[in-house]
Image (cartoon, rainbow, N blue to C red):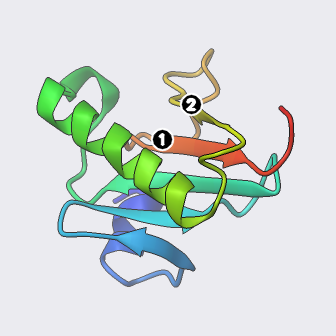
Amino acid sequence: MDIFCKIIAGEIPSERVAEDADWIAINDIHPKAPVHVLVIPRKHVEFQDVDANLSGMLLVAARNVAEKLGIDKTGFRVIINHGEHGGQEVPHLHIHVLGGKKL
């Protein structure tokens, strides 16, 4: 079980920024910007198994998180890291939402 599955299960505490039945959003523990939130599907899924419904849902979730945190007007960055060369550290699909300054 990866760290995100443990966070979702409540085994590891996290600061949840937002959530719904399908995903959670938590603050990144090593932020790269004033706002750095991870949007994580509750169901364990890896990048190669993503479908259009899941990817669309997560992008809408990222937009909603940006709106909630007030970075939607000035702009924000959405990042998905995949694989070792892409900088992925946890093998559980997640989206980084970064903002709060010019990136």
Would residue 19 be found to the left or right of residue 103 on screen? left
User: Which amino acid type corresponds to the residue marked 2 in the rendered image?
Assistant: Ile
Toward the right, the furthest residue is 102
Label 1 close to label 2 by CB (< 8 Å)? yes
Horizontal and vertical percent position of residue 94: 43, 43
Seen from the viewer's position, the closer of residues 15 and 1 is 15
Per the image, the residue denoted by label 2 is 79
The residue tagged with tag 1: helix, strand or loop? strand
**Place of residue 80 in the rendered image (x, y in percent of width and height, measured from the top left):** 50, 29
Q: Give SS at disc 2.
A: strand
The residue positioned 82% from the left and 57% from the top of the image is 34
| Side of 14 where 76 appears, left or right | right
Residue 55 figure quarter: top left
Instruction: Specify which label sits upstream in the sequence, 1 or 2.
Output: 2
The residue where tag 1 is placed is 95
> Residue 39: horizontal and vertical position, in percent?
44, 53
Q: What's the residue type where badge 1 is placed? A: Ile
* Numbered circles on residues, count: 2
- Which quadrant: the C terminus? top right
Q: CA–CA distance between discs 1 and 2?
A: 6 Å
